[in-house]
Amino acid sequence: MQPVEQKILSRIYGRGRGWAFTKIDFVAEFSEANIHQALSGLTRAGTIRRVCHGVYDYPRYSELLSQALSPDIDQVAQALARKFNWRIQPSGDTALNLLGLSTQVPGKWLYLSDGPNRQYAIAQQILAFRQSVLKDTGFKLRESGLLVQAIKALGKEHLDSSVIEVLRQWLPSTLRVRVLRDTRVATGWIYEAIKQICEEDS
């Protein structure tokens, strides 16, 4: 294995299984030619796989099924966002799924974006980006946007104490003060819900 290939592989291993990436994730350290050669070699060896044009992942593996699992669509979305320098935000049902509030696997994963409308076929699923007003994508923290989109998708009437508790368990306590500050621009009732989620456990 070439030294550059070994270095790139150690970066990939460091991120863990499920991580999706493009050559952009390595251009600060290596030349494009070396990156291309390394990614091609690692793909041929079966260490990584190509999930769509220009995007690869280090596949998660199921011991039970003795096979690689489908790509992590959220990781692929983030890899594409880094590649094109977009800001993205999981929309409604996608946010619910990522937060564990929906057990249905969506056939279409929709992300709001400050980039153009785009659509990708990943395994048997569709990953779509929809251009949206910056208010929906302008949070500094990824967790802030996820919460806002999930709460909006649920609707006021479905926001009960059990949902608040699930979201409170999901949001690390170390981030709560920052999320509160970050989401002040959110609609009134959504911000009230976030305040409940961020309350310290009594």
Image (tube, rainbow, N blue to C red):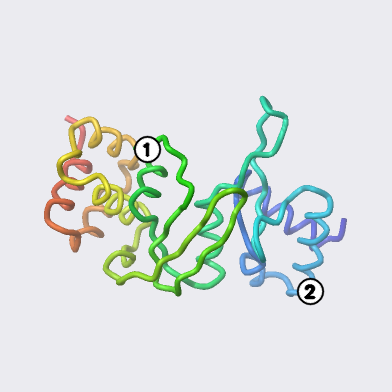
Callout 2: SS = helix
Q: CA distance from mark 2 to mark 1?
A: 43 Å
Q: Amino acid at mark 2?
A: Ala
Q: Nearer the viewer, mark 2 or mark 1?
A: 1
> Which residue corresponds to the image point at 67% horizontal and 67% vertical from the top-left?
23
Q: Out of 11 and 38, give the one closest to the viewer.
A: 38
Q: Out of 173 and 57, give the one closest to the viewer.
A: 57
Q: Amino acid at mark 1?
A: Ser
Does residue 132 appear left or right of residue 127 in this picture?
Answer: left
> Which residue corresponds to the image point at 66% horizontal and 25% vertical from the top-left?
64
In the rendering, at what x and y percent does residue 186 appear? 19, 59
Query: Which badge, 2 or 1, comes first in the chain's sequence?
Result: 2
Estimate how packed mark 2 is, as few (under 14), some (14 to 19) or many (20 or more) residues with alpha carbons within 10 Å: few
Q: Is residue 162 above or below residue 96?
A: above
Image quarter in which the N terminus is found: bottom right
In the rendering, at what x and y percent does residue 187 appear? 16, 58
What is the quadrant of residue 34 in the picture?
Answer: bottom right
Image quarter in which the C terminus is found: top left
Does residue 65 appear left or right of residue 42 in this picture?
Answer: left
Residue that numbered label 1 is attached to: 102
Callout 1: SS = loop
Does residue 76 appear left or right of residue 193 in this picture?
Answer: right
Estimate how packed mark 1 is, as few (under 14), some (14 to 19) or many (20 or more) residues with alpha carbons within 10 Å: few
In the rendering, at what x and y percent does residue 120 appear? 56, 61
Residue that numbered label 2 is attached to: 33
Does residue 145 appear left or right of residue 58 in this picture?
Answer: left
